Image: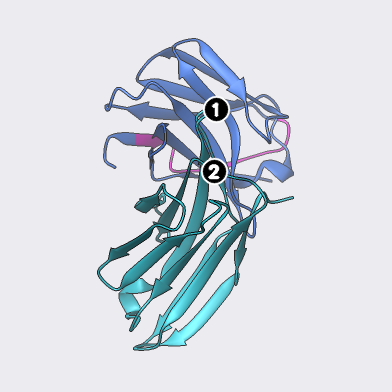
Chain colours: A cyan, B blue
Amino acid sequence: TQLLEQSPQFLSIQEGENLTVYCNSSSVFSSLQWYRQEPGEGPVLLVTVVTGGEVKKLKRLTFQFGDARKDSSLHITAAQPGDTGLYLCAGFKAAGNKLTFGGGTRVLVKP
Amino acid sequence: DAGITQSPRHKVTETGTPVTLRCHQTENHRYMYWYRQDPGHGLRLIHYSYGVKDTDKGEVSDGYSVSRSKTEDFLLTLESATSSQTSVYFCAGGTDTQYFGPGTRLTVL
């Protein structure tokens, strides 16, 4: 059973469209992280959100942490083919210094 | 992060054989982790280390052991490989922010 549920599992859109990926949990985390992974490589950190209600922007990517620090979303505006990849959310709990990962959302942006 | 390397990058082995995967870091991370990645499961923690010779189990530790004799190196051993251990294995270092190696694709026939 996944402690972090990501939805959808797969998303295929046309270039220029918007998309949102959701990450939900029944647990409270110290922080919530989003990683992006390309084929044949390890995940790379995109952003960390720490405060409930926090919103962070990274160019066309907007990340939001829920008020209760249990859920998060990633919104991409005007998606580009370069946004194609596997997006992973991960919750960090300071006790034990461990990350719990969601199942991932595979995003395909077609030109 | 170029500071974490894994070897081998690809391996094919037979059921019942022992396999050791190596992770080497140059970033002086105290914490290091081994994950496996399977479709639909994201990354699942196998074992982790919080210092030299200090290790603990993750959520999917059965059939795996680890060793850390020095800060730079973290080894993952499959004592007797099974087909269910066919997966992509990632090593990572860090704490609240983790930096991942490029992965090892292991196939157990």
Who's the residue at 59% across and 37% down the image? Answer: B45
Name the spot of residue B39 as percent of width and height, x first. 62, 59
Residue type at the position of mark 1: Ala
Name the spot of residue B49 as percent of width and height, x first. 50, 21
Q: Nearer the viewer, residue A24 or A82?
A: A24
- A3 versus A108 height, above or below: above
Residue A64 falls within the magenta-colored stretch: no
Q: Chain of mark 1?
A: A
The residue tagged 1 is A95
Residue type at the position of mark 2: Phe
Q: Which residues are magenta?
A: B5-16
- B49 versus B10 height, above or below: above
- Disc 2 crowd, CA 10 A, few/some/many (<14, 14-19, 20+): many
Q: Chain of mark 2?
A: A
| Pointer 1 and pointer 2 on the same chain | yes
Who's the residue at 51% across and 49% down the image? Answer: A90
Q: Quadrant of residue B31?
A: top left
Name the spot of residue B78 as percent of width and height, x first. 64, 28
Q: CA distance from mark 1 to mark 2?
A: 10 Å
Q: Quadrant of residue B65?
A: top right
Q: Which quadrant: the C terminus of chain A? A: bottom left
Residue B14 falls within the magenta-colored stretch: yes
The residue tagged 2 is A29
Element on which disc 1 rests? loop
